Amino acid sequence: MSPVLEVTGLRTHFHTRAGVVKAVDGVSFKLEQGEIMGLVGESGSGKTVTGFSLLGLVDPPGRIVEGSVRLNGTELVGMSERDLRRRRGREISMVFQDPIATLNPMFTVGQQMRMALESHGSISGRAAAARSEELLTMVGIPSPRARLRAYPHEFSGGMRQRVAIAIALLHRPSVIVADEPTTALDVSIQAQILATMRTLATETGTSLIWISHDLAVVSSLATRLAVMYAGRVVEEGPTADILRRPRHPYTQGLIASLPAMAEPGAPLTQIPGTTPSLLSLPPGCPFAPRCPRATAACAAEPVLTRDGTRAVACFHPAEPA
Amino acid sequence: MTYLTIDHVSRHFAPHLTLGEKIAARLGADVETRAVQAVTDVSVTVPRGRTLGLVGESGCGKSTLGRVISGILPPSTGTVLLDGKPVMTGGNKTTTRVQMVFQDPFASLDPRMKVGEAVAEGPVAHGLTTRAKARDYVAGWFARVGLDPALADRYPHQFSGGQRQRIAIARALAMQPDLLICDEPVASLDVSIQAQIINLFLDLRRDLGLTCVFISHDLSVVRHVCDRMAVMYLGRIVEEGATETVFNDPAHPYTRSLLASVPELVLDADDLVQFVPIEGEVPSPHAPPPGCHFNPRCPFAKDICRTEKPPLKPLTADRFAACHFAEEILAGAAT
Ligand SMILES: Nc1ncnc2c1ncn2[C@@H]1O[C@H](COP(=O)(O)OP(=O)(O)OP(=O)(O)O)[C@@H](O)[C@H]1O
Ligand SMILES: Nc1ncnc2c1ncn2[C@@H]1O[C@H](COP(=O)(O)OP(=O)(O)OP(=O)(O)O)[C@@H](O)[C@H]1O
Ligand SMILES: [Mg+2]
Ligand SMILES: [Mg+2]
């Protein structure tokens, strides 16, 4: 079966006055129907911009400069805004990291959900209200009917986040990009959302890209994991395998930083050095300046190389289990 | 020595109804006319240099309480004291000693202002640095939160979520507060940068005696940085105590359910984790259930729980709980 989504050699750059920010610089992956892929990585490594690129939502001065995004066999890169808009929400949708980007402060949540429903065909007010209420219930908002009449600022942070999830689900799209969708949720409601998402994937075949910093959440939801660093995927493979035996030194450093790995109150392990500036990335492996295993070989750029189920972009990867 | 005193603080939000809705409500239509009880009768103290964790269900009133403590939102009743002096008088904030890092860093940054200026603004206005030295001052704080000081000339939309969160942290710290209210300060940071920020908080606490209120859904982070923690449910504190005590042996049934839902790292692909939310419906803050607010979802609820509100009472040396059956639960004798 052909994948639902196939991303090849994606590069998205921002042309700023200070120079070119290579936010996404060579990202490739495939997503099968009903598959949940976790996307993790350093803050600022290009996860959100990757998501935006898939939906054609990158604003100038940003631009997809290279690569291909095929959704259900159709190439999205270079497609007209009008055609993209027809697919957005219906075939592919995104839960934004920043709920403000989804919610307009001037309208009630109910009005916004109705507008989202109307954007892909006419629907009666009654049907729209029923569908909206159904989704707010699904994401665990108490008194959903009363809440439809409330404005975004009257919701708590976690409630806004759940409304954003509900809006992304309105049209039952085949691919959902969920960007940090549960950061503002308590563990109980998070469990409810995760259960809902898994059901969507297994029962309706929705494919998910789950962007998150919470490795525990990713490990319990996503079967496959991609790790990003400085605009590229540096490691990819089955989630449990990567977490048990990370091969890339960045992934290893990430796992060692988990608070669970330290005594309460003691300093936590952190990866030495600082995040590279995407403006002036030196040639070669972008992680080399912070890497304990770097050698002269790392002056060349490592490519993501597949070995069985796992792939890594490193000249000195740790042995897989 | 008590530094922060939260004394019987409550905060509600009245609904703003249009004239039409008011009339409809009179006529018996389904319009919500009751106020939201966001925070109800919360009292807790924090000694100087200590960190209090605030955890609980989404919508239980943590951010509202945080905003009241920071003097951004006046309480409906009750007072907040810093070193014995009220944070607000006559609806106005009276001190810069308390700063807040907001849950939503984008909403708190002016999109038209360069981030370096946003960080410098407060410290310059309050004489912590001068206009001439502001650049270096800001650069110092940028470096401490792991941001390249060269980024100070950019605008908020040019940053990733985690970078914005760190700008918000730098802005609050640059005011050199004695009390910092952090609302989900590390939620959108990768674990390595999260470690760097947590280490920074630990340093500031040790070196400058910074007092913190730390709101977070990430219980492993709370466990790592907080001396004490308060668990909230529907606007009230239901359990409060030394962090390790609460984690090792939670007394309130809500705390127990919450800790049981914490996801763990799954290292075996054949292990299909079941996601177990706490049973029952999340109650509406418009009409909390009578008696103990948690009773409709509580596995131990008895008749008394449906009629009588349990007070927050001392249970063991370093912990309080608001449950009629807390002793039995701790003794493992509750049914
Ligand atoms: N409009 C823009 N102009 C210039 N640079 C930008 C712009 N938007 C994003 N960037 C840069 O692109 C890089 C990637 O950003 P992105 O938001 O994708 O990161 P991320 O991986 O989602 O990080 P986080 O985990 O912190 O959300 C960042 O370094 C950011 O500063
Ligand atoms: N300005 C407001 N107007 C009306 N209701 C409000 C307002 N601010 C908060 N509320 C309500 O008060 C309750 C508590 O909200 P608060 O933001 O304090 O929750 P929280 O514990 O911080 O939740 P989260 O973990 O989701 O951020 C919620 O029911 C919310 O809808
Ligand atoms: Mg992001
Ligand atoms: Mg909040």
Image (tube, helix red, strand yellow):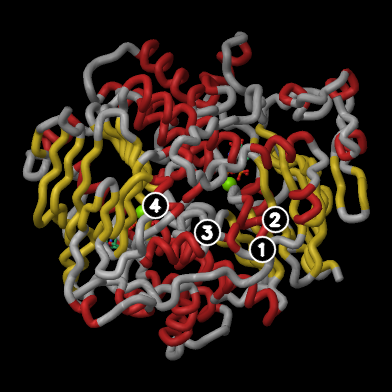
Residue A98 shows in this picture: no
- Return the chain for callout 3: B
Specify few, some or many for label 2: CA neighbours under 10 Å numbering under 14, 14-19, or 20 or more. many
Picture quarter with ligand 2: top right
Answer with mark 3 or mark 1, whichever residue precedes in sequence.
Answer: 3
Q: Which residue is mark 2?
A: B53
Instruction: Between label 1 and label 4, give the one nearer the viewer.
Output: 4
Q: Residue at x 39, y 54 (%)?
A: A321
Q: For the residues marked 2 and 1, what is the alpha-carbon distance in whole angstroms?
A: 8 Å
Is any atom of residue B77 visible in this view?
Answer: yes
Label at residue B225: 1
Cα–Cα span, label 1 and label 4? 28 Å
- The residue at 36%/56% (across/down) is A320
Residue picked out by circle 3 = B186
Q: Could you say which disc has been placed on residue A242 in the image?
A: 4
Q: Residues within 10 Å of mark 3 (few under 14, many from 20)?
A: many
Pick the quarter of the image with the N terminus of chain A: top left
Q: Is residue A195 above or below residue B266?
A: above
Mark 4 surroundings: few (<14), some (14-19) or many (≥20) residues within 10 A: many
